[in-house]
Image: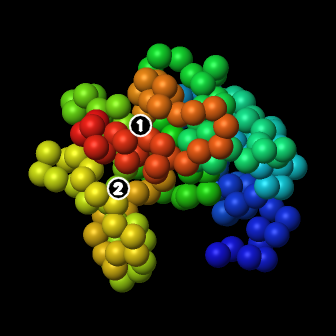
Amino acid sequence: RLNPLTKNFAKPALPVLGIPIFWFNAWHLSRTLGIKKVIMNMCHAPNTIKKAVEDKDLKKHTGLDFIISDETKRILGTSGALKKIRPHVGDEPLCVVNGDALFFPNWSQLIEYHRTKKALLTLHVHAFAHTSYTEVKINSDGLVTQFCENAGGGLMFSGAYVMEPAVFNLIPEGPSELRTTVFEPLMKKQK
């Protein structure tokens, strides 16, 4: 959807107001939760990610430190990429956000909700209308009950979520996708 801008540029490194998109999300996490270490996945146009991560002014003003997870030789998918970063993650919940999305969820509220529900994974969702996205259906207890393809409105997954480290045990080594490997099995377990 961003061609030709992304032909030789990674989407997360595209500038908005002169700042690479992923920096906004990383900085928001830092300001709201005090996070100082960010793990960044890269595959397409890795030189643009490397350059953006090493921006001295942004690093100085945010105090953020980045670890790069390199998938240039083998793309692992949305959950395979998570499995690869397990050695860098401690025992606290992990906050994950798509690097090419520009939005500012209330992370403190999301984590509190996550803890209150004793969930293994909590999706950030928001309303959408008049476009075709996968709808996330939830029940009155806030549990995901279904994913509906090409819905014309409802709630959609924003690309941000909170995940307990125990979820890593569900993810096989090698390529895999979040929806089939993690989201749907946890939905069936009501977790």
Question: Which residue is tagged 2?
Answer: 125
Residue name at image x 16 percent, y 53 percent: 139
Of 1 and 56, which appears nearest the observer?
A: 1
Residue 177 in sight here: yes
Question: Which residue is tagged 1?
Answer: 162
Identify whether 134 is placed above or below 183.
below
Q: Secondary structure at mark 1?
A: strand
Residue 52 in sight here: no
Considering only order in the chain, which callout, 2 or 1, is on the residue closer to the N terminus?
2
Q: Secondary structure at mark 2?
A: strand
Quadrant of the frame with the N terminus: bottom right
Identify whether 69 is placed above or below 155.
above
| Figure coloring | rainbow
Q: Amino acid at mark 1?
A: Val
Taking 101 as reference, is 3 left or right? right
Quadrant of the frame with the C terminus: top left
Q: Position of residue 120 (x, y in %)?
A: 35, 31
Identify whether 126 is placed above or below 62.
below
Residue name at image x 40 percent, y 75 percent: 150
